[in-house]
Structure formats: C-alpha cells, structure tokens
Amino acid sequence: MDIRPITVKYELTTYYEKRVPVISNQADLGSSHRKEIIKRVGVWFLQVQSIYPLTVAKKK
C-alpha cells in the first residue's frame, strides 16, 4: 500500500495573473507607507502597537 503524501500543483489562471501587478503595487505602497510613518512618529510607536494594540471600548 502506497501511503506517500499526494503532491498538488497549483497554477494561477489568466484572470489572476493579470492581477499580480496590482497586488505587488499594493505591497509596495504598504512598505513605503510604513517607512513614512516610522520617519514621522518613530519606530517606538510601531513597537508599542505590536505589544499593546489599540482597542475599541465595548458598549455595555
């Protein structure tokens, strides 16, 4: 009995291949935005946010 894991290959369809540049541009925008925020507020703010994220008070 052969119990090897099944190998699955995935391919992007033409529809999604056309969207790769858009997704890439969004990633670039996010990176440049993060750099700008770090310049303005400092890296300490991002570190504090990762430890103590802002929360919204729940209504009672």
Image (tube, rainbow, N blue to C red):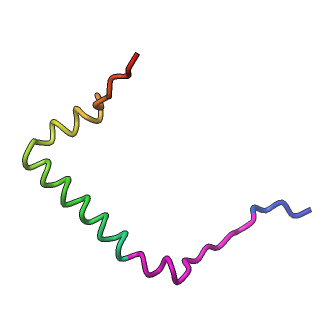
Residue 15, position in %: x, y?
51, 80
Work out whether 30 lies above or below 59. below
Q: Residue at x 20, y 53 (%)?
A: 34
Residue 10, position in %: x, y?
61, 73
Residue 9, position in %: x, y?
64, 73
Q: Is residue 52 left or right of residue 60?
A: left
**Is residue 36 magenta-colored?**
no
Q: Is residue 17 left or right of residue 27?
A: right
In this orientation, which residue lies closer to the viewer: 28 or 9? 28
Q: Residue at x 30, y 32 (%)?
A: 53
Viewport quadrant of the N terminus: bottom right
Q: Farthest right residue?
A: 1
Give, as a single range, the part of the protein colored magenta.
6-20
Q: Residue at x 56, y 80 (%)?
A: 13
Viewport quadrant of the C terminus: top left
Q: Farthest top residue?
A: 60
Q: Main secondary structure of the magenta part?
A: loop
Residue 39, position in %: x, y?
8, 49
